[in-house]
Image (cartoon, rainbow, N blue to C red):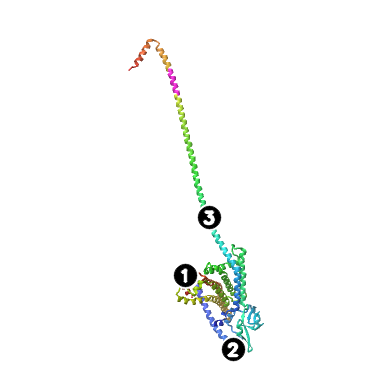
């Protein structure tokens, strides 16, 4: 109390205390309702918005990465399929060519064998004809010769004798 | 590295100045007393203390320039009722203090309104009657406080309105962009670390209002002329009111465990509990009192320092003293700028800390440790 009376600086005036209380309460109520509340709300909203946006961006990034992976997988699969298809086509083509070749060869062989068969048949026919003609000729000639040779009796007998000698009865 | 010699030079200059200063004050006092003795009241010696106190104390008029000052309304409550009149009534045309006759005879004695009575044809303070006098005048400090309230309302309501206008998602503009970082600072550096994420929102309006009110008045106090010039945040009534508000908020929001820690410290021997209870109880009151004294002393000390440096010129009675006094006054002024912000921050931070301590949920394993910390604290 002594200090309060000695130093006027540490003696609070009731007037200032009174007005200060009023001023502070007015500030607290008015600012609290019309300044701090909207400001803090707006800031919080903005912060949550930013957070949300960041989260969304992260999610999108993950999605994009997943999509990229998927794309790559699809691409790889497509590539594989293409390679398979090309291989199949090639195989088919090869097979077709070899089949054609085989078939051609068979046909060729068949034609050749047919031809050979025909040739042999014709050759045989020709040979038979020749043989027949030669046979008949020989018979004709032999008939003519025999007719001429055996025109006398003596000669006929010698010949029979000759043949008989040739035939051995055993 | 280079700042070391500059620092030592500064220290040297300062000590030299203080030595001269103290010597001169002694000389001045001697001369002053001599003058008073020989010539009476006519030759008034320059009184440093009086000059400085005059600038720091509250006043019933607001000095504008030269002999012109703004007369502020005087509101008095006496057993005979309310009385309102202009403080100009206390001055005559020669700028001398005179008594004003209302319900009583009022006169300003040492800056305060007192009831005077005639004793042996001279006016003397009627101490008994003055005790029943309640002075609710709009003094310089009250007017300056209202100015700060007005500034805060205009600036902050404009800033808050900007959110409605531009929406939430757009970046802040203008006043809004200046205020938002400060609001965020109070929220992220003061409220959340001290009170915790769960409970801070309830106390944000209170902390923000305290911070901005103290900050604005600290800054206004640094302006040496009209809109500023009053020493509001360096006035004990102002800091006391805010400290009482903090005291009320802290104790109203205190939970059971806070009171338990004050009256019956858990995890201690019963004798220790008995010993600690009064200490903790005193702590309940010393916390707001320390808030009150810290802000008052810091701001007042800064003003006294600047005024003392300026007074050097009048003590030496030479204009050349300003060569040292003015740079130092500017230097201290810059420090005061820092202090103005720092003290607003510290006041708010400690308020938040006290609220945080009062609302904290204690865990049982932490009891012993907490107890030791509190003992060390006191």
Mark linked to residue A63 = 3
Residue B160 position in % (x across, y down): 61, 67
Question: Secondary structure beneath disc 1?
Answer: helix
| Furthest residue toward top | A153
Which residue sits furthest left?
A170
Which mark sits nearer the N-terminus, 1 or 2?
A: 2
Determine whether the residue tagged by mark 3 lies in a helix, strand or loop. Answer: helix
Q: Residues within 10 Å of mark 3 (few under 14, many from 20)?
A: few
Q: Which mark is residue B366?
A: 1
Residue B196 pos. (x, y %): 52, 68
Q: Nearer the viewer, mark 1 or mark 2?
A: 1
| Residue placed most toward the observer, B51 or A137 | A137
Q: Nearer the viewer, mark 3 or mark 1?
A: 1
Range of residues picked out in magenta = A125-137
Left or right: where A125 falls relative to B70: left
Callout 2: SS: helix
């Amino acid at each position: 109390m002594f200090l309060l009376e000695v130093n006027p600086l540490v003696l609070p005036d009731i007037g200032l205390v009174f007005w200060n209380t009023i001023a502070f309460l007015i500030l607290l109520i008015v600012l609290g309702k019309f300044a701090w509340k909207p400001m803090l709300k707006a800031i919080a909203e903005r912060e949550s918005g930013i957070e949300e946006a960041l989260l969304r961006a992260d999610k999108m990034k993950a999605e994009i990465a997943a999509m990229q992976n998927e794309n790559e997988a699809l691409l790889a699969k497509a590539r594989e399929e293409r390679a398979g298809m090309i291989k199949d086509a090639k195989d088919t083509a090869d097979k077709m060519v070899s089949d054609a070749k085989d078939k051609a060869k068979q046909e060729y062989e068949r034609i050749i064998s047919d031809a050979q068969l025909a040739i042999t048949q014709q050759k045989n026919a020709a040979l038979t004809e020749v043989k027949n003609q030669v046979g008949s000729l020989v018979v004709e000639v032999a008939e003519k010769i025999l007719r001429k040779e055996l025109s006398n009796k003596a000669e006929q007998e010698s010949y029979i004798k000759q043949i008989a000698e040739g035939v051995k009865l055993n | 590295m280079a700042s070391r010699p500059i620092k030592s030079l500064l220290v040297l200059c300062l000590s030299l100045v203080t030595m001269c200063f103290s010597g001169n004050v002694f000389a001045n006092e001697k001369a002053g007393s001599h003058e008073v003795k020989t010539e009476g009241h006519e030759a008034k010696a320059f009184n440093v203390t009086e000059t400085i106190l005059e600038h720091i104390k509250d006043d019933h008029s607001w000095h504008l320039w030269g002999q012109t000052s703004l007369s502020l309304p005087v509101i008095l409550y006496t057993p005979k009722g309310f009385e309102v009149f202009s403080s100009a009534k206390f001055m005559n045309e020669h700028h001398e203090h005179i008594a004003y006759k209302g319900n009583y005879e009022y006169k300003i004695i040492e800056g305060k309104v007192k009831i005077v009575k005639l004793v042996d044809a001279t006016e003397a303070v009627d101490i008994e009657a003055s005790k029943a006098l309640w002075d609710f005048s709009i003094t310089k400090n009250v007017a300056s406080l209202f100015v700060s309230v007005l500034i805060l309302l205009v600036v902050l309501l404009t800033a808050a309105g900007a959110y409605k206008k531009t929406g939430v998602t757009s970046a802040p503009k203008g006043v809004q962009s200046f205020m938002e970082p400060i609001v965020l600072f109070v929220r992220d550096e003061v409220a959340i670390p001290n009170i915790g994420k769960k409970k801070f929102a309830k106390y944000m309006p209170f902390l923000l209002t305290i911070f901005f009110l103290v900050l604005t008045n600290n800054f206004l106090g640094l302006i040496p002329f009209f809109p500023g010039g009053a020493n509001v945040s360096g006035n004990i009534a102002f800091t006391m009111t805010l400290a009482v508000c903090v005291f009320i908020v802290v104790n109203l929001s205190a939970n059971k465990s806070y009171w338990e820690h004050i009256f019956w410290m858990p995890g201690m021997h019963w004798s220790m509990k008995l010993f600690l209870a009064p200490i903790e109880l005193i702590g309940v009151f010393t916390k707001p009192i320390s808030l009150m004294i810290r802000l008052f002393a810091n701001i007042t000390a800064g003003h006294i320092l600047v005024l003392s440096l300026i007074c050097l010129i009048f003590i030496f009675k030479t204009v050349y003293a300003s060569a040292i006094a003015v740079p130092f006054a500017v230097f201290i002024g810059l420090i005061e700028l820092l202090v103005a912000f720092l003290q607003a921050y510290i006041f708010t931070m400690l308020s938040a800390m006290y609220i945080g301590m009062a609302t904290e949920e204690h865990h049982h394993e932490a009891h012993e440790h907490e107890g030791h910390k509190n003992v060390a604290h006191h």
